[in-house]
Amino acid sequence: MTRGRVAVDLTAPLGTGDLGPESVPIRFVEALAQHVPDVEFVIVSRAARHAGARPTRASNLRHMVVPEPGRAQRMWSRLVGRARRSRYSRWASALPAWRDRRLAKIDADLVLCPFTLSGLAAGSTPVVVAVRDLQHISSPFLLNAAERRSRAQGYEITWVRASRLVCTTASVRETALRASRLPRESAITLALAPLLVGTPSEVGSAMGMPARNRLRSGGYLLVSGDFEARHNHRVLLTALGMHRATHPECDLRLVCAGTPGPGMATLQRAAEVMGLANALTFASSPTLDEFADLLQNCLALVAPWLYETVGEAVLQAMKFGRPILHSGTADLVELVGSRDGAFDPRTPATLVAALERIERDTSWLGHLAQLARERALSFDEPHTVAHAFADAILVAAAAPR
């Protein structure tokens, strides 16, 4: 017997990338379906933005492709959103919400936006939004004007439709509450990274990915993240150049794992100009297993990120007992549980100091590894997180409409 049917809204992803089979929203929903078999999930996506779902054994997960919304629907949704946020909000609350005809056929108890914007007109069906990325509010300097405007417009509609928010960190929750003006009881905080990370026993121990890139086990630092401003690769490259200038004998390499694009090409050119091409290795779009290979055999994970609120790479490093050097932002400290290993992400010299300490003080590296292992034990198992999330969102379906 099922507890409910959830329409998963993947029609309006953040950014411009396709929702491929290893994208965060897809992996998150697949994990939910696997761990919560008594809830039916229906993925709803636009054909133009979905790169195809991989086969799944979950009998409670299916996929539906819908056409792009009409102009009238987009205009009405924006009009209602702006009216409800204006001085006429009391009058605007009586405006009828547009309901997508395809959504009516699903007969869903609620609509879930898993780290995406709301693209489906849900009418009176409750909408729950899992929120992890509000950098257009918290760190607008990391986005260009067009990106900030696009996100602001998308969230304007999303906040109006949302009846409940599930946020990845406490700071994201506070930002979301200020932006959405929803009651405080409508938003909760839940660490969702365990649903995106496999356990060490699920990953082979072979040196496949490192060996193909001629990497020595323990002879490289690993950096995870697409080549966006928030992942701060430029400061990392500057620190590496400073370190090599004073320690030319050092053969420690830096491996950057991420999706190819303009950002990667820019970083490659900068490395060549700085004479660091031989010190950098780019692991383009590694699979989950390939990334786990790299992580298991690295000396340490380096997280110079200026904005990150899920941190699945950090949690995976902790599960493998790998030391973590991180930027010390509030969200990362909350995830890692300690400021040990932190450096100033805006001052390359502090990262240089951390690299020098790694080389001369092996006991500190062991201390960071022990902290990582202990912190990993404090996170709930994926099964527990999935059921906590399902319980939290199904509350919205049970609420009076």
Image (spheres, grey):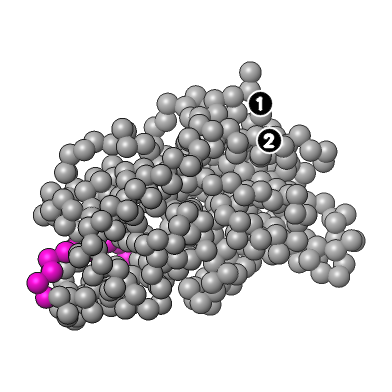
Q: Are marks 1 and 2 in contact (CB under 8 Å)?
A: yes
The boundaries of the magenta stretch are 248-261
The residue under the point 17% across, 79% down is: 246
Q: Locate residue 165, reporting x and y percent.
A: 66, 50
Residue at label 2? 394
**Residue 106 sits inside the magenta stretch:** no
Tell me if residue 151 comes above or below residue 184 in the rendering: below
Q: Locate residue 132, reporting x and y percent.
A: 55, 55
Q: Is residue 280 left or right of residue 333?
A: left
Tell me if residue 14 comes above or below residue 57 in the rendering: below
Placement of the N terminus among the 4 image quadrants: top right
Front residue of this view, candidates 25 and 176: 176
Classify 10 Å Cα crowding around label 2: few (below 14), some (14-19), many (20 and above): some
Placement of the C terminus among the 4 image quadrants: top right
Q: Locate residue 166, reporting x and y percent.
A: 63, 48
Q: Quadrant of residue 271?
A: bottom left
